[in-house]
Structure formats: structure tokens, C-alpha cells
Image (tube, rainbow, N blue to C red):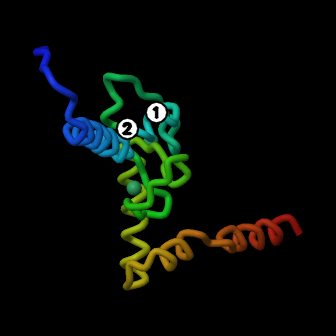
Amino acid sequence: MATRRGPPDPARLDRIVAEARRSQEARARTYREQALKLFPWICGRCAREFDRSTVQQLTVHHKDHNHDNNPPDGSNWELLCVYCHDNEHSRELEAAARDGRADDNATQAATHRPFANLADLLKGGRRNG
Ligand SMILES: [Zn+2]
Ligand SMILES: [Zn+2]
């Protein structure tokens, strides 16, 4: 480090600080790193555990499917292994294809079926009675 005579240049310092802040933000913005810091390295579906050698198979899923929605508390993130993540999105695509549209709300409504086990209940009731 060369020592320079004269007063420090405030503009130069500002630039350094701004640059440092920018790169820090860029790093923080990579939600994958944030999610991996926040959550234990376990798949939210199959409960498979990961470590440093396998963590690249762990992905960050966005619960509302909006990759721009990255709250710092991680409330929109879910860690899923690549297989479960694939599964999650192929279900979503199937539902969208069935509906003929890829609307998020419609997709959620389609995957949430409150009467899914009604037929089973009726069947079971009949068999018992
Ligand atoms: Zn999994
Ligand atoms: Zn996803």
C-alpha cells in the first residue's frame, strides 16, 4: 500500500463504499445463498439431507412461483432437491396445460382440491354401512 500525501479524496472514498455496498447487495440478492443460510439443508418434500458436497442438488423453490418475490425472511422460499423441485413444477405445468392458461391463481386453485377425498369418504361410508 502506497501512502499518498494530501487529504483523502472524499469522492474516491464514496466510490469505494458505493462499490462495496453494490457488490454486497448483488451477493445478498442471490436468494439461493440467502436461503441456504436461513434454512437447514433438507429437502422440504422428501426430507433428504444435504452437505457441502451435495448441496448443488438442493434448489430454492418460490412458493408463489414469482422469482422476483424474495423477502429476506425467506417466507417465499422452500428448499427442494432437484427431483422434488422438478416434480413440483411439472405438476404446475400439467395443471396449467389442463386449464389452458398459466395463471398463478388458477394453478393454485387447481392444485388445492378441498373435495379430493370426498369420494373416498363416501366409498368408505358405504362399505362400513
Ligand atoms: Zn426431495
Ligand atoms: Zn420452483
Q: Give the secondary structure at mark 2.
A: helix
Residues packed near mark 2 inside 10 Å, few (<14), some (14 to 19) or many (20 plus): few
For this rendering, which residue is in front, 52 or 83? 52
Residue 37 location (% of width, % of height):
46, 33
Residue 76 location (% of width, % of height):
51, 55
In this picture, residue 96 sits left or right of residue 26: right
For this rendering, which residue is in front, 32 or 80? 32
Callout 2 touching callout 1 (CB < 8 Å): yes
Residues packed near mark 1 inside 10 Å, few (<14), some (14 to 19) or many (20 plus): few
Q: Is residue 40 above or below residue 125?
A: above
Looking at the rendered image, the quarter that the C terminus falls into is bottom right
Name the residue located 46 percent from the left edge and 74 percent from the top edge: 104
* Label ID, residue 33: 2
Q: Is mark 1 within 8 Å of ligand 2?
A: no
Name the residue located 72 percent from the left edge and 72 percent from the top edge: 118
State the residue position of label 1. 37
**Residue extending furthest toward the bottom:** 100
Name the residue located 53 percent from the left edge and 75 percent from the top edge: 110
